[in-house]
Image (cartoon, rainbow, N blue to C red):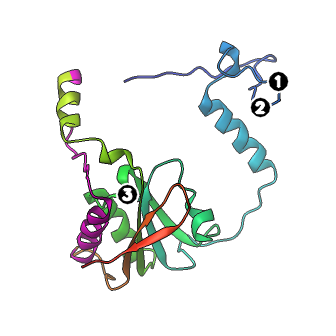
Amino acid sequence: MTTSASVPTGPDSAIRTGGAGENSTAGTDSTAGTVTNRLVAANERYAADFTDPGMDARPVLEVAVVACMDARLDLHAALGLQLGDCHTIRNAGGVVTDDVLRSLTISQRALGTRSVVLIHHTGCGLESLTEEFRHDLEMEVGQRPSWAVESFRDVDQDVRQSMQRVRTSPFLLHTDDVRGFVFDVRTGLLREIDPA
């Protein structure tokens, strides 16, 4: 799917944003801009008060967190993390793929992390998908994706599989502190998964 967005210019091009109760025309007026325009405007407000925290790229807590990209997971709030505490690696399902292993390897070998925390969650969309998704994409666009969907039916077992993939990777220096959890999207609590 291809999308495009135009960036308004000129004196009447202000990006209209607003929450409940504010005079917002987003979504109803073509001059209101796109969601991306709203994000850029928010960044401009953020940058106006920004001061360089003087941080190194190395996480203070020497931990990498691998989690699902689900918008309901506010990892920093849920884990009590602050800016600079950890590396956060997110994808659909929070599964350990080759690309996640690439990021973890760089995180450990170049940036000093030693611990890995894996977080899946209840009600994950990957529980309802199958590898048939790839077939459907191939039929639609004429090319089969090179990646696996990594769908699963049992979230606990998928966390175990992800822990095993991390622990057995020859590229990682530190595989002794790898723990996996399931985040409950209704209660906000983590439940640790026994790797056995």
Q: In this view, does 123 lie to the left or right of 172?
A: right
Crowd tier of the residue under label 3, counting other residues whose Cα lies within 10 Å: few below 14, some 14–19, many 20 or above: many
Are the two marked residues, 2 and 1, in contact with CB atoms closer than 8 angstroms?
yes
Q: Residue at x 37, y 24 (%)?
A: 1
Residue denoted by label 2: 18
Residue 171 seen: yes
Tag 1 secondary structure:
loop
Mark 1: amino acid: Asn
- How far separated are the C-alphas under marks 2 and 1? 7 Å
- How far separated are the C-alphas under marks 3 and 1? 38 Å
Residue 158, image x and y in percent? 27, 62
First in sequence, mark 3 or 2: give its number. 2
Residue 144 seen: no
Residue denoted by label 3: 94
Mark 2: amino acid: Gly
Crowd tier of the residue under label 1, counting other residues whose Cα lies within 10 Å: few below 14, some 14–19, many 20 or above: few
Q: Residue at x 33, y 70 (%)?
A: 105
Which label belongs to residue 23?
1
Mark 3: amino acid: Gly
